[in-house]
Amino acid sequence: MKWPGQAAVEVSLITIHKGEWKNKIILDNKTVERITSYLDDSEVIGKPMPLASNKGKSFQGSIVLGKGFVLTSKEALDLKKKDPEIKMFFSILKWGGP
């Protein structure tokens, strides 16, 4: 669908389901047999294979694109004190993984 407004953006709205899907499969308001990873209903031809030669060559990582989600050290410590379970969240933010 085209993004409302003047931005030159298109978005794909999807629903994810864990387990076997037992209802109709709908794509672009039509019943289809499948929806592929390309978000179409084309027949799957072969199985894509990762390129071993590219292993470990690139990783983008997280990029903060606005200050709205950036916490001061005091705010981070206050959150940690309120909820000890949040330590995993801070681990992920600091190191990129648990």
Image: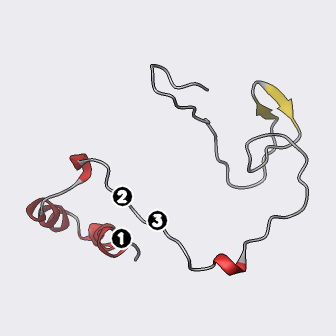
Residue 3: image location, x then y, percent: 52, 26
* Percent x, y of residue 10: 57, 32
Q: In front: 78, or 30?
A: 30
Q: In 3D space, how far apart are the residues under numbered discs 3 and 1 (Cα atoms)? A: 15 Å
Q: Residue at x 40, y 77 (%)?
A: 98
How crowded pointer 3 is (Cα within 10 Å; few <14, some 14-19, many 20+) is rated as: few
Q: Is residue 70 shown above or below 86?
A: above
Disc number for residue 30: none
Give whichever of discs 2 and 1 has the lower sequence position. Answer: 2
* Side of 23 where 89 appears, left or right: left
Q: CA distance from mark 2 to mark 3?
A: 8 Å
Cα separation, mark 2 vs mark 1, equals: 14 Å
Q: Amino acid at mark 2?
A: Ile
Estimate the x, y position of residue 23 in percent, counting from the top left: 80, 38
Q: Which mark is residue 60?
A: 3
Residue at point 64%, 41% (across, down): 15
Amino acid type at circle 1 is: Ile
Q: Amino acid at mark 3?
A: Gln
Q: Are marks 2 and 3 in contact (CB under 8 Å)?
A: yes
Front residue (pair 13, 22) = 13
Of helix, strand and loop, which one carries label 3?
A: loop
Q: Would residue 49 be found to the left or right of residue 87 on screen?
A: right
The reply, left or right, for residue 49 in relation to residue 74 is right
Looking at the rendered structure, the secondary structure element under dot 2 is loop
Q: Which residue is mark 1?
A: 92
Q: Nearer the viewer, residue 17 or 60?
A: 60
Frontmost of labels 3 and 1 is 3
Image vertical order of residue 26 relative to residue 67, above or below: above
Give the quadrant of residue 50: bottom right
* Residue 78: image location, x then y, percent: 12, 62
Residue lying furthest left in this view? 74
Q: Residue at x 78, y 53 (%)?
A: 20
